[in-house]
Amino acid sequence: MNLVVVSNRVTRGKANEPMTGGLAAALLPVVEQSGAIWVGSSGRLRDGPQKERFAEVEALGAGAIAMLDLPAAHYGGFYEGFANSALWPALHSRSDLIRASHGDYLSYCEINAFMARALLRFRNRDTAFWVQDYHFLALGAELRKLGVTEPVGFFLHTPWPARNVMSGVPHHRELVEAMLAYDLIGFQTDEDCENFLAYVGQDLGLSVQDSRVTSRRGGIVGQTRCATFPIGIDAEKFAQAAMRAITHPQVSRLRRSLHGEKLAIGVDRLDYSKGLVNRINAFDLMWTREPALLRNVSLLQIATPSRGGIEAYCNLQNEVARLVSDVNGRHGEVDWTPIRYLNKGFGQAVLAGLYRCAQVGVVTPLHDGMNLVAKEYVAAQNPDDPGVLVLSKFAGAANELDAALVVNPNDVDGMARAIASALSMPLAERRLRYAAMMARLNSHTIHDWFNGFVGALRDARIEKETVEPALPAPAILPRRSAGPALRYY
């Protein structure tokens, strides 16, 4: 089976290319080893009428990457508009932040249709398409419109919210109906899968049996299988990278600058879903309540800016910067800064070394699909003297890494106590917790995730039968002229 993987952006995986976990870091190693073709945006935009031309196609290990210039006329409404001002806040249960115009929705549909046409270049009888994430909820339906009958699967890297939250998204019904064109839909957690099945069963009134949704598109009855595929990492490979990174110049400079003090680390995109404000408030409270920790532990917070054209992100950036300045002003000394706050990304080689330097990893999102930073932090630790992971109960990773100190990110007092506990945890307990988490990471790697989904997609086919008389197709997208979830470990 020739596999075509589709995402909004692709990465070449250079060692110094900034990365903070997430989709790109996950897909890179499996594309390199599997021979898949990874298709996505080049990051460049084109003006005026255009064909679906690929700007670049190049080898990536045993696979390849193909990059497409997207139409400038629709990209803003697609990306900063509907995808990240309507879908992203809803998927992270922030219905108060949903903002989108009808024009944004039309642009979202146009980009999905544009990508579908471009993918036909890679279609043959043995092709399967695997679509990644919320940018392309409608891509499967667009491929079906073009006559694609080969397997098409979809994996959602974010959470899927409760029914009442999803119903706050404009055109939510049309989008979910479009998703049912996929043969297989994968989620990070059982809760996400169950939320989706509850929506299609109750809001769309469709039949759901054994995690299969039966739906009708025109005169065709088809089934979509829904299942849980928690994403992993290559823990051993990341551990080796962390060992090598100890001698990296940036890592060496960090170690020398600590002068024996302990370090906590947070690595996130600058996003309201990551819980940065509550995290900083927790450190502030810890230093206020336990002044003995002043000058004995600092926080390295890497917060990579993103989506700067969206008001909610600009407001967050200003709020976090103000808060960091306030905490440093009250607790800092002329020769000591409590929070080292960096608004830039680092390559995986450097990040692995930074994780290994830190006695505490703080991963406290308010809501997250999985959060691979949590897994990378654990994998990077020195087995003889491991650090402690403080992990939000609302990250998908908490379902697997239950040997972490699991916290409620809305409970600032509880987080402050957990961080202090992590700093004073005895070596024997740290080793036990680390061993348990590493065993879990090694039992389900990124390659197991990839093979599990691809195997399920290979077996999944939409079971079709002609329905007479044919009923009108549901209005999935505008015309351009106008049960218990299965778990795969």
Image: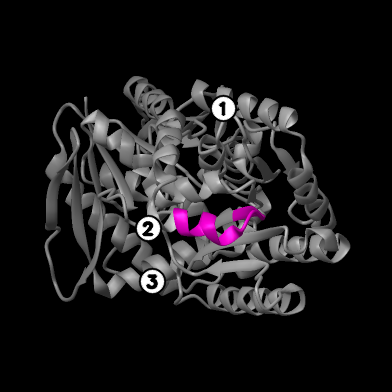
Sequence-first disc among 1 and 2? 2
CA neighbours of label 3 inside 10 A, class few (<14), some (14 to 19), many (20+): many
Identify the amino acid type marked 1. Met
> Which residue is pictured at 40% across the width and 54% down the height?
19
In depth, the one of 105 and 332 nearer the eye is 332
Residue tagged 3: 77
Q: Residues within 10 Å of mark 1 (few under 14, many from 20)?
A: many
Image spot of residue 441 (x, y percent): 53, 28
Given residues 488 and 383, the one toward you in this image is: 383
The foreground one among 444 and 468 is 444
Q: Position of residue 220 (x, y in %)?
A: 35, 33
> Is residue 106 visible from the viewing direction of this image?
no
Distance Cα–Cα, label 2 vs label 3? 26 Å
User: Residue 310, position in %: x, y?
Assistant: 49, 75
- Reading the image, the residue beneath label 2 is 18
Residue at the location (70% across, 33% down)? Answer: 430
Q: Is residue 296 magenta?
A: no
Q: Residue furthest right?
A: 289
Q: Is residue 105 above or below residue 199?
A: below
Q: Which residue is mark 1?
A: 438
Query: Element under label 1?
Result: helix
- Regarding mark 2 in the picture, which secondary structure is present there? loop
Q: In front here: 94 or 462?
A: 94
Residue under the image location 78 percent in, 52 percent down: 415
